[in-house]
Image: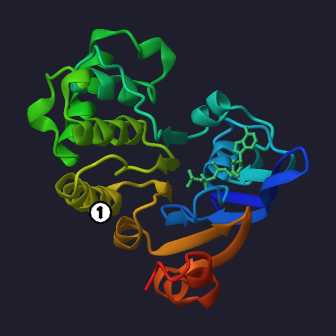
Amino acid sequence: MSLLECRGLTRAWGAFRAVDGVDLTVEEREICAVIGPNGAGKSTLFAMIAGNLRKTSGTVRLGGEDVTALPAHALARRGVARSFQITAICPGLSALENVRLGAQAKMPWRFFGGAAAMRQGEERAMIWLDRLGLAAQAGTLAGELAHGDQRLLEVAVALAQEPRLLILDEPTQGMSVEETRRTVELLRSVMAEARTAILLVEHDLEVVFALAPRIVVLHRGRKIADGPADEVRADPAVQDAYLGGLH
Ligand SMILES: Nc1ncnc2c1ncn2[C@@H]1O[C@H](COP(=O)(O)OP(=O)(O)OP(=O)(O)O)[C@@H](O)[C@H]1O
C-alpha cells in the first residue's frame, strides 16, 4: 500500500480543467517532485492533495484511508504538513518559538501547555533548527531573519511536526543563487535523515534534479511523465513541453 494514492484527480472551473484526471502515488519516505510549465496545474494539484481546494472529481487515499473529502486541518492531524510558497511563520515570535510550536503540535493536547512539554518542545525545536543551519538564529525574531532563512524556518516548522507527508511549495523561491545553493545542500542532508515522504513543487530545475529521485511532469493539467529523474529528463514529450528547456 502506498502512502499517498491519488486517482483521477480533476479540478475544473467551468469548462476549463486546470487538473485533468491525474493519478499520483507516493511511497513512504519517497521524495517526488512535480514540475511543469507555468499554468500546468501544479499549485491546483497540491491544493487538492493538501485539502485546501475542493476536488471536482477523483479520490485521494492516505495510508489506505479515503481522505478525498477531508479539509486541510483534518489532513494535518493525519500527518500531512504543507510548507507554503507564501511565508507562513509568526514574524513576532523567535525562530525557536516558531519551531517549538510545530514540534508541540505533535504532542497530546493535555501536555501542550505544561513546563515539561515546553522543555521537550524546545529541545526538539533546537534539533531541527540545527539541522537547517539556523541554530545561531534561534533567538532572532522570525520577521527579522533574511528571506532565505525564513524559508528554511518554514521547512523546520513543518519537519518538527514529523509529518508522514510534507508538501513543499517552492522552497527556494525568491532566494539568491548563494542562498539556493546552501538550501539545496541543507535540504539534501535533512531529507536523507527525515522519515517523511516529500512532494515538492519547484520551478528551478537544477534544484529539482538535485533533490528528487522521481519526477512527475504536468502539462495543461495532465500528467505527461512520471519516473526516475534521468528518464524524465530524456523524455521527448517533456522536452517538447518545456520547448527544449531541459537540455
Ligand atoms: N480560482 C481559479 N479560477 C479559475 N482558473 C484558475 C483558478 N486557479 C487557477 N486557475 C487556472 O488553472 C490553471 C493552473 O493553475 P496553477 O496555478 O495550478 O498552475 P501552476 O502549474 O501552479 O502554475 P505556476 O507554475 O505559474 O505557479 C491556470 O491556467 C490558472 O489560470
Circle 1: residue type:
Arg
In the rendered view, would you say 125 is above or below 171? above
Is any part of residue 56 visible from this angle?
yes
Instruction: Assign the C terminus to one quadrant of the image.
Output: bottom left
Is any part of residue 58 visible from this angle?
no
Residue at image coords 42%, 29%: 88
Instruction: Assign the N terminus to one quadrant of the image.
Output: bottom right
Considering every residue shown, the one lying at the far left of the view is 136
| Residue where numbered disc 1 is placed | 188
Percent position of residue 103, x then y: 36, 30
Count of all numbered marks drawn on residues in the image: 1
Percent position of residue 115, x then y: 27, 10
Q: Estimate how packed mark 1 is, as few (under 14), some (14 to 19) or many (20 or more) residues with alpha carbons within 10 Å.
A: some
In the rendered view, would you say 13 is above or below 90? below
Residue at image coords 79%, 38%: 54
Q: Quadrant of residue 97?
A: top left
Residue at image coords 52%, 90%: 234
Secondary structure of residue under mark 1: helix
Q: For disc 1, does the CB lie below 8 Å from ligand 1? A: no
